[in-house]
Amino acid sequence: LLTHPGEGDHGEMALALVEPGLVAFGSAPSVRQAIDRKSGGGANITTNEELMGLVRDIDDGNAWAVGRFDAIAKSARLPREVAGQLPPINWFAATGHVNGGLRGLLRAEARDEVAAQNLRDVLRGFMALARLQSNARPELTTMMNSLELGGDGKTVSLAFAVPSEVIDMLGAMGVHRRGAEPDDPEPDSDPDPDFDLDVPPVPPTPPTPPTP
């Protein structure tokens, strides 16, 4: 069990190699609880049929995550204005396949079919706005055109693909933004701004000898 002290409002984090091919990562108490349940048997997450159904549906990438949306939204600290516009969502799942670029699928299980339809309407508005903004950035057009909204009943899904060129562009933008930050001004080594060190001082006029 590897632990790392938390910073600010975040508690202690932990990572554990539970078994070959299985890693547990999260807050230290939750990881310890997962290890105890794995070793001691009894009730665990595999008894939750609704959640395990989502896991089986998305277990086709080399990275995936499933959880209750309220817990994810709380940890992500979504702005109140954004959270207030979202319909009721019970479960959230994400899967991705990283191979040069990134291909992924986001899936949400809404509380009912009405909430699912409202969520689709929200996503359609977001996709339309994003496509309008991408017109000024041709390199983003491929990614925006890959967005595919789907799902039926209480399920809403959004598929996407991010080409490697876009990932490289975003990385270059981050480097350029950091490089554009002004450096600290060098201290002024000239104590007198009216005196130029490159020009030698004019010698004083010699005194006039007295008249005999």
Image (cartoon, helix red, strand yellow):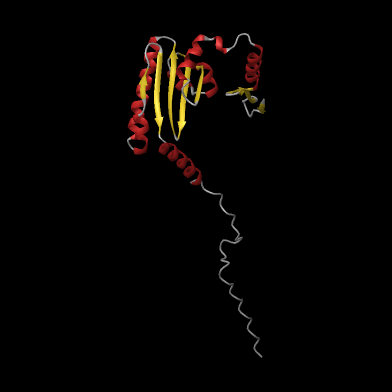
Q: Position of residue 110 (x, y in %)?
A: 43, 13
The image shows a total of numbered marks equal to 0
- Left or right placement of residue 79 versus residue 154 in this view: right
Q: Position of residue 153 (x, y in %)?
A: 38, 11
Specify whether residue 137 is in view.
no
Residue 179 drawn above or below residue 59: below
Q: Nearer the viewer, residue 95 or 129?
A: 95
- Left or right placement of residue 65 versus residue 87 in this view: right
- Which residue is painted at 35% across and 22% down in the image? 124
Q: Position of residue 181 (x, y in %)?
A: 51, 45
Q: Nearer the viewer, residue 191 or 71?
A: 71
Residue 151 drawn above or below residue 186: above
Q: Nearer the viewer, residue 140 or 74?
A: 140
Specify whether residue 92 is in view.
yes
Q: Quarter of the image containing the N terminus?
A: top right
Q: Position of residue 58 (x, y in %)?
A: 46, 19
Residue 111 drawn above or below residue 80: above
- Which residue is painted at 56% across and 52% down in the image? 185
Farthest residue to the bottom: give it.
212
- Left or right placement of residue 160 versus residue 69 in this view: left
